[in-house]
Image (tube, helix red, strand yellow):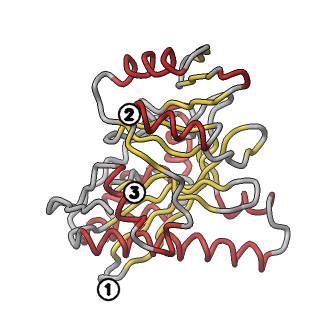
Amino acid sequence: MEVITFPKDRVIASKWEKTVVLLQNRTLSKFVPDTEKLDYQTLQKMLKTHRMVYVKPTIGGGGVGVMKINKLSNKRYKLQNTTSVKRFKTFDGLYNSLLKKMKNKDYIIQKGISLLKYKNRLMDLRIMVQENLKNEWEVTGSAARIGSTKKIVTNVSSGGITVDFKKMLNHFYKDKTEQNQFLDLLHQLSLEVANQLYKYNPNLKEIGVDIGLDDQMHPWILEVNTKPDPRIFFRDKSTIEKVVRYGRAYGRKYDLTPKFEHEKKYANKLGKIKRSIHNFR
């Protein structure tokens, strides 16, 4: 197993390093998709095992640089990013095109998860975990992200929107007890992620866990962000206020300026949220 040493910083940038650390936890390893560093051999191997994979920049966020590869019949391949789709008759053709798009940056390959869809659009979750005022890990927010039509990512910066995840659960679980049990599972999973990363970086104060659900409602940890953006919770004033209160306690300052139309809409509904939080004690 690769040995990982994190810098003495609250931000852990490398997706690969975070994945390696999570895989060292037996409980969490069941929820982490098969992942490799991207090169010619590993891509070939992964496409033999999985008919769909995602490739992601090792460092970066917002869905930038993410691409999806499907292995089609007759040894053909389809490569899709946020703006285009290309098909290739050979693996070498696919790989050479990929190299050009990678621009000499390091990438990882991740087993593709057939995510649950809402109204034919991809859906995943963001769960926020923070160090609270008692210096304990606490889940402070959860939201569902709905991707734009035909997009391969759910990020708001790529046209996605956020919705109340508890309300979304009504579409998958009719029984309230089952809803609460499933939500508790996701929260416990996210807390375990925080605890595991904290073992390797005790300066960690907050994380945003991106979780995908497959058609069996099995949760998969798609990514962990150690500098999460709280604007995803604009729909819920109490959540935003708690996130900011905890963040201030450990010295984090958030840029809450709305960037996208749906954020501006909800910021206005919440009564000028920037001003209310500025005055919040």
> Which labelled disc corresponds to residue 134?
1
Q: Residue at x 50, y 45 (%)?
A: 110
Q: Secondary structure at mark 1?
A: loop
Q: Amino acid at mark 1?
A: Lys
Q: CA distance from mark 1 to mark 2?
A: 44 Å
Q: Image quadrant for the N terminus?
A: bottom left
Q: Amino acid at mark 3?
A: Thr
User: Viewer-proximal residue, 77 or 64?
Assistant: 77
User: Viewer-proximal residue, 22 or 137?
Assistant: 22
Q: Residues within 10 Å of mark 3 (few under 14, many from 20)?
A: many
Where residue 268 appears, x then y in whole percent? 51, 45
If you read the primary sequence from the N terminus, does the residue marked by circle 3 or circle 2 appear first? Answer: 3
User: Viewer-proximal residue, 126 or 263?
Assistant: 126
Where residue 77 appears, x then y in whole percent? 62, 22
Q: Image quadrant for the C terminus?
A: bottom left
Look at the numbered discs 3 and 1 and tell me whether their residues touch, using CB distance below 8 Å: no
Q: Quadrant of residue 57?
A: top left
State the residue position of label 2: 39
Q: Amino acid at mark 2?
A: Asp
Q: Residues within 10 Å of mark 1 (few under 14, many from 20)?
A: few
Q: Residues within 10 Å of mark 2 (few under 14, many from 20)?
A: some
Q: Secondary structure at mark 3?
A: helix
If you read the primary sequence from the N terminus, does the residue marked by circle 3 or circle 1 appear first? Answer: 3
Q: Is residue 186 above or below residue 70?
A: below
State the residue position of label 3: 19
Q: Is residue 266 above or below residue 221?
A: above
Q: Nearer the viewer, mark 3 or mark 2?
A: 2
Look at the numbered discs 1 and 2 and tell me whether their residues touch, using CB distance below 8 Å: no
